[in-house]
Image (cartoon, coloured by chain):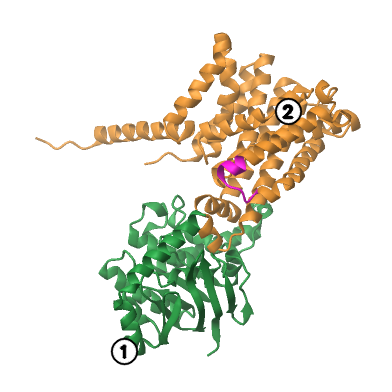
């Protein structure tokens, strides 16, 4: 199988801190690829580099063979890379259905002119958008809440809604940033089920997750980061047996590193 | 049981259509026409601020550009009424392209930058005498005619303004329910998530500025025929601020709210005229009180009250018609 996404020596510096340090990543088309590591290992920074929400300091990102290193995030989204956010970024005052409809923006064409004249093209496209959005809501089990404002949904449902908004565009690559955070046990089991179903729909997934009961059953391969560097790579079975990984998770340095990276990222965001 | 949402709009429209049949006073019809023109301005502002969250204080400048272009074409070249309105709108839209480099600005930065634009446009109108007549103003704007028939009478001109307001209202309503409208709302609520959905921020915002400027330009064209004399003092940055007040006090994001807000801003000082010098203070107080009541605006508060009343009425009726248990 060909690599859908490759990074070559990707680094990201926040001031004096290398949050991601020369990482080579290979994600094969059709797989669920786990990205794990202790707090502060640089996982979310890496995801932001892949989605284009942060520019790389050095290195190259290839998607389906094309160099996307300089593409802004909206162009990457249009090219088929979609993501969810660790801290939920929904359009809170729009309904659940409208949120998912926005997800189809890049793959639809109607302009202001079509909307003003209500052309047949526009009506057909709007009907098509609504139908696809409803199907995506049904997929995550939120049909009954379609007309509720997104901000009023329970937390677990908001997570599912964000996945639906990303998934509705039939992305080639879906980046999930801690989708199980804040979910209860039964919601987590649902999530595992969704990940399998998204994968079988042909979407490649990169999954950042702390909950090993979500990572281990779903991932085909796992990449482990530590202090921004690639620590290990392999199947879930290999990773579980890897001495270096076990050391990183138990090591004392991890806590200090996490604090340093959070501080640096916060400073960067404030900047 | 809920009220059908289109009903209040329909009733409001019927009342607006009937105004000249009831009110024959030329002065008041003149004021009402001005309120309709202001409502068109407020609708353009609602697209910027209510839908896309763009706090622009440049709408007064586009209003002025539309007014001067339409007025000059009519006075100097005898261009027909509707064509001058279109030209005013297009000129304002073209001028909005000057703002493309600053659409990336947010919040207060955008407000101050667009305010600067308003000040510059005002200075150009004031000082470029060859183009605008300078401080003497632009005079001799002819009476508007449609297909050879004069529409300058106060009642007829009022209805012309009303037709254009309805067209702009329908256009904004259609935009708000379209792919573009959703993109603007998405940008307003979370820019990063909007980008992650493939929405190009600068492109969408520029289009938003363009449509809003066109709307303000058309309103400016109507104003040129309404007053038939344009003075630079009609288009100071203060105008931009009044337009913002209209959109905000009516109810941010609500199209009906924009219309109501415009009527309040134009009519209230007239109604308060008997209070003499106190009237602008009373107007200011009313704006402050309304803002203190939350961000619902007049339309939001009114529909809340209507829903309460309606709910009370429904439950009372249910109570009356409830079959009583026999003792």
Q: Mark 2 — residue?
A: B223
Image x and y of residue A225, in percent = 42, 78
Point out which mark residue A241 bears.
1
**Depth check, front residue: A72 or A42:** A42
Instruction: Tell me the magenta residue range.
Output: B103-111
Q: Chain of mark 2?
A: B
| Relative side of B94 to B269, left or right | right
Q: Tell me, yes or no, whether the highlighted magenta stretch contains residue B104.
A: yes
Find numbered disc 1 in the image and state the secondary structure of the residue it sits on: helix
- Which x, y percent locates residue B106? 58, 47
The one nearer the camera, B168 or A225, is: A225
Question: Residue at (51%, 17%) from the top-left corner?
Answer: B282
In space, the residues marked 2 and 1 are separated at their CA atoms by: 78 Å
Can residue B221 be seen here? The reply is no
Q: Which chain can be seen in orange? A: B
Q: Is residue B183 visible?
A: yes
**Chain ID at mark 1:** A
- Give the chain letter for green: A
Is residue B176 placed above or below B165 in the rendered structure? below
Instruction: Report the side of A27 relative to A182 (left or right).
Output: right
Is there one chain holding both mark 2 and mark 1? no
Where residue A201 appears, as percent x and y from the top left, is 47, 79
- Residue at 55% x, 45% y is B53
B277 over A32 or under it: above or below: above
């Amino acid at each position: 199988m060909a690599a859908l996404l490759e990074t070559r020596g990707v680094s990201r510096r926040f001031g004096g801190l290398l949050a991601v340090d020369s990482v080579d990543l290979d994600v094969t088309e059709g797989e669920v690829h786990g990205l794990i590591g202790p707090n502060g290992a640089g996982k979310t920074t890496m995801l932001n580099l892949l989605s284009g929400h942060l520019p790389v300091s050095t290195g190259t990102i290839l998607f389906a063979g094309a160099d996307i290193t300089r593409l802004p995030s909206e162009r990457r989204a249009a090219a088929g890379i979609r993501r969810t956010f660790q801290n939920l970024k929904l359009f809170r005052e729009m309904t659940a259905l409208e949120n998912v409809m926005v997800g189809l923006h890049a793959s639809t064409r109607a302009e202001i002119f079509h909307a003003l004249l209500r052309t047949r093209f526009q009506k057909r496209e709007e009907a098509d958008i609504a139908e696809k959005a409803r199907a995506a809501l049904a997929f995550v089990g939120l049909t009954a809440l379609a007309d509720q404002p997104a901000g009023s949904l329970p937390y677990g449902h908001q997570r599912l809604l964000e996945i639906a908004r990303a998934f509705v565009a039939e992305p080639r690559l879906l980046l999930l940033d801690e989708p199980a955070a804040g979910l209860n046990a039964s919601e987590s089991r649902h999530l595992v089920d969704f990940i399998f179903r998204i994968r079988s729909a042909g979407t490649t997934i990169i999954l950042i997750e702390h909950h090993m009961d979500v990572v281990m059953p779903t991932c085909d391969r796992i990449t482990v980061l530590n202090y921004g560097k690639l620590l290990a790579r392999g199947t879930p079975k290999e990773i579980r047996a890897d001495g270096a990984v076990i050391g990183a998770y138990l090591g004392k340095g991890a806590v200090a590193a996490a604090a340093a990276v959070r501080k640096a990222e916060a400073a960067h965001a404030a900047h | 049981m809920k009220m059908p949402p289109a009903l209040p709009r329909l009733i409001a429209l019927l009342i607006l259509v009937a105004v000249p049949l009831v009110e024959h006073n030329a002065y008041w019809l003149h004021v009402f026409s001005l309120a309709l023109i202001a409502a068109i301005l407020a609708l353009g502002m609602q697209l910027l601020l209510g839908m896309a969250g763009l706090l622009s204080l440049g709408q007064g400048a586009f209003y002025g550009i539309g007014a001067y272009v339409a007025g000059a074409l009519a006075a100097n070249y005898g261009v027909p009424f509707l064509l001058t309105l279109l030209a005013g709108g297009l000129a304002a839209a073209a001028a909005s392209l000057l703002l493309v480099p600053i659409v990336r600005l947010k919040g207060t930065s955008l407000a101050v930058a667009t305010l600067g634009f308003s000040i510059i446009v005002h200075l150009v109108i004031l000082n470029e005498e060859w183009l605008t007549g300078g401080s003497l103003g632009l005079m001799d704007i002819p009476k508007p005619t449609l297909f050879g028939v004069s529409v300058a009478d106060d009642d007829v001109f009022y209805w012309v303004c009303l037709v254009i307001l309805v067209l702009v209202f329908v256009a904004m309503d259609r935009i708000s329910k379209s792919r573009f409208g959703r993109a603007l709302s998405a940008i307003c609520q979370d820019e990063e998530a909007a980008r992650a959905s493939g929405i190009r921020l600068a492109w969408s915002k520029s289009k938003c500025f363009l449509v809003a400027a066109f709307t303000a330009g058309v309103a400016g064209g109507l104003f040129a025929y309404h007053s038939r004399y344009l003075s630079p003092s009609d288009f100071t940055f203060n105008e931009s601020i009044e337009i913002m007040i209209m959109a905000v006090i009516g109810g941010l994001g609500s199209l009906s709210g924009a219309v109501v807000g415009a009527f309040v801003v134009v009519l209230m000082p007239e109604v308060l005229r008997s209070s003499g010098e106190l009237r602008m203070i009373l107007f200011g107080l009313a704006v402050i009180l309304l803002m203190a009541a939350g961000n619902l605006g007049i339309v939001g508060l009114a529909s809340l009250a209507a829903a309460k009343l309606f709910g009370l009425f429904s439950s009372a009726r249910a109570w009356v018609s409830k079959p009583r248990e026999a003792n």
